[in-house]
Image (spheres, coloured by chain):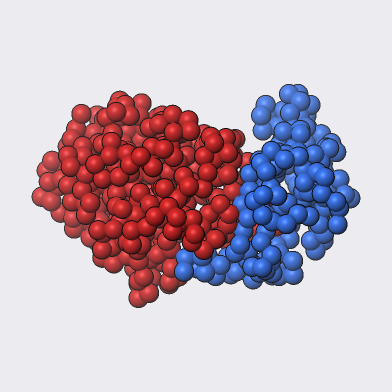
């Protein structure tokens, strides 16, 4: 009997789309397929081997049919940008339970060019349409950002702490030809940039891009037999959590309970501690999120996140290399960034990253979705425990 | 420009919704209609649980804390404090970029938190200290009235 955690299920195929950034000649479904076909090939498999499919948008049947896959297990979990963390977790459970043997997880989004994109509409009778949108909370930069001042205020922190996040992550992006923003920057430059929604300036907001990514997961036992499965990345532990569908109704604007709950379950199921983590991916649609995550996931104490980043601990050679692709702030952000955070963790654990963390063995991936509505956490490793 | 893309994306939503005069207008549902009936009458009404005594938001026919169906609408004080905010320099039309919008979280004295706008003050950070006391005011939006807030001590316009 296979369990879902403890390294008994593995990611054996992983790829992003061939191009990311500005890709006006590929539709959403083409981006899904581009990444999926690369990930299946990366695993040394064919489409005929896939018997499970998971994706967030569009519906999984649209993706499976387009690819010529007949699935016997489908997961359309949609909780925003961390949907893919949940898909990995659900796929592991399905494989452990025998409901599927070979699961494909896909993401494709034409976030910038909007080619074949489905509008994300929340009507005027929805909770958001009644209680947030009438007040101008319609765009991510004017909604997801609202709690940030509270977080900073309660800790005696300020806008410089947001700027430090941008500066640290830009350092990782600087050498990465696929990163959208690569030019090294300074705290002053970030603070002096075009104001978007105080306290946020432009560089504190993510890039908006086109692209996609896909993963293939099988049992560790099956991974060992795959021709192309020479570099499995094992799922040690995972967690997921929900909170409120409206940002205004999160239990505490200065700390996100779903980060705490999802990450605690991931650590517990993985049976690892914070000191065991070599590499951290923290979903950064806006610059306040890594600050919340470092504290809520428990890498630092309350109020220590800003200094931790400013002192260089998340940069090259630091104790917790974070967002080593440059993150959503610099690398790419199609709208649902979670897939790219997982892809970078896989690359780091395979030793294939552009900015490689030497000897990375365990990576922690923290996702967030639908502003502060949901969270998903993964503990991944290149070795079985 | 990322922000322009977001604008385009959200404009589609607005146009689809067909509400382009002052901004989107809420469409009440059976569970929320008493709240909007209150704002139209110039009152802020919230539900309070008869079993555990807590106020909650947004509206529903039972208490989200203790599940009791014994809930009743009550007029509340309309007083609260400024918990957090952004000053949106890129508001969507019909709001204008030269009129930055303060999108705020206000925690009412009775406990629940609302997303709202701070009006009646120049939208600059110096005027908006966190934890400042605020009081409700109502702005007509189409057939509805939206609960917005003023800093206490600011003269009513």
Q: Looking at the colours in the rendered structure, which chain would you say is drawn in blue? A: B
Total count of labels:
0
- Horizontal side, residue B43 vs residue A84: left or right: right
Colour of chain A in the rendered structure image: red
Where A305 sits versus B155, above or below?
Answer: above
Relative depth, front residue between B75 and B98: B98
Residue placed furthest toward the right: B41
Which residue is pictured at 55% across the width and 45% down the height? A148
Relative depth, front residue between A200 and B5: A200
Q: Let me know if residue A338 appears in the view.
A: yes
Where A298 sits versus A216, above or below?
Answer: above
Which residue is pictured at 38% across the width and 52% down the height? A167
Locate residue A215, reporting x and y percent: 28, 51
Relative depth, front residue between A359 and A334: A359
- Horizontal side, residue A199 vs residue A380: left or right: right
Locate residue A92, reporting x and y percent: 31, 39
Residue B54: name its quadrant. Answer: top right
Residue B134: name its quadrant. Answer: top right
Locate residue B151, reporting x and y percent: 77, 46
Relative depth, front residue between A78 and B128: B128
Residue B98: name its quadrant. Answer: bottom right
Locate residue B123, reporting x and y percent: 69, 56
Where A273 sits versus B106, above or below?
Answer: above
Residue placed furthest toward the bottom: A25
Q: Let me know if residue A10 appears in the view.
A: no
- Horizontal side, residue B17 vs residue A384: left or right: right
Which residue is pictured at 35% across the width and 49% down the height? A168
Which residue is pictured at 19% across the width and 32% down the height? A384
Residue placed furthest toward the top: B51
């Amino acid at each position: 009997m296979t369990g879902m955690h403890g390294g008994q299920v593995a990611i054996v195929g992983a790829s992003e789309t061939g191009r990311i950034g500005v890709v006006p000649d590929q539709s959403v479904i083409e981006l899904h397929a581009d990444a999926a076909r690369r990930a299946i090939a990366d695993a040394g498999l064919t489409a005929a081997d896939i018997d499970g499919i998971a994706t967030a948008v569009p519906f999984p049947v649209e993706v499976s049919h387009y690819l010529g896959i007949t699935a016997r297990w489908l997961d359309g979990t949609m909780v925003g940008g961390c949907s893919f963390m949940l898909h990995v977790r659900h796929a592991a459970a399905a494989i452990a339970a025998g409901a599927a043997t070979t699961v494909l997880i896909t993401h494709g989004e034409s976030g910038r060019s909007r080619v074949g994109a489905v509008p994300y509409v929340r009507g005027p009778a929805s909770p958001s349409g009644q209680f947030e949108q009438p007040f101008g909370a319609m765009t991510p930069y004017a909604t997801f950002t609202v709690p940030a001042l509270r977080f900073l205020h309660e800790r005696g922190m300020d806008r410089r702490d947001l700027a430090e996040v941008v500066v640290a992550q830009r350092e990782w992006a600087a050498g990465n030809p696929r990163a959208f923003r690569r030019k090294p920057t300074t705290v002053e430059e970030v603070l002096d940039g075009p104001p978007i929604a105080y306290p946020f300036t432009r560089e504190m907001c993510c890039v908006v891009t086109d692209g996609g990514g896909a993963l293939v997961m099988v049992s560790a036992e099956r991974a060992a037999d795959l021709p192309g499965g020479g570099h499995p990345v094992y799922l040690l532990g995972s967690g997921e959590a929900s909170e409120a569908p409206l940002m205004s109704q999160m239990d505490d604007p200065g700390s996100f309970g779903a980060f705490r709950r999802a990450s605690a379950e991931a650590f517990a199921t993985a049976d690892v501690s914070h000191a065991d983590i070599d590499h951290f991916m923290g979903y950064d649609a806006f610059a306040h999120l890594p600050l919340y995550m470092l504290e809520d996931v428990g890498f630092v104490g309350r109020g220590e996140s800003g200094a931790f980043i400013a002192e260089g601990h998340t940069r090259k050679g630091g104790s917790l290399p974070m967002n080593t692709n440059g993150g959503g702030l610099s690398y790419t952000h199609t709208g649902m960034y979670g897939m790219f955070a997982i892809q970078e963790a896989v690359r780091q654990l395979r030793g294939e990253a552009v900015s490689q963390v030497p000897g990375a063995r365990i990576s922690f991936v923290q996702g967030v979705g639908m502003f502060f509505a949901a969270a998903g956490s993964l503990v991944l490793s290149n070795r079985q425990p | 420009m990322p922000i322009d893309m977001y604008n385009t994306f959200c404009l589609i939503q607005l146009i689809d919704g067909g509400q382009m005069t002052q901004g989107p207008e809420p469409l009440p549902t059976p569970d929320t209609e008493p709240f909007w009936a209150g704002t139209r009458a110039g009152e802020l009404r919230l539900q309070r649980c008869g079993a555990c005594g807590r106020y909650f938001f947004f509206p529903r026919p039972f208490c989200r804390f203790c599940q009791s169906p014994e809930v009743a609408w009550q007029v509340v004080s309309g007083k609260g404090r400024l918990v957090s905010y952004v000053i949106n320099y890129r508001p969507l039309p019909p709001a204008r970029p030269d009129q930055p919008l303060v999108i705020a979280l206000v925690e009412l004295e009775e406990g629940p938190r609302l997303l709202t706008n701070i009006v009646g003050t120049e939208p600059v950070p110096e005027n908006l200290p966190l934890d400042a006391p605020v009081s409700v005011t109502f702005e007509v939006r189409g057939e509805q009235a939206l609960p917005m807030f003023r800093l206490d001590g600011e003269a009513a316009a």
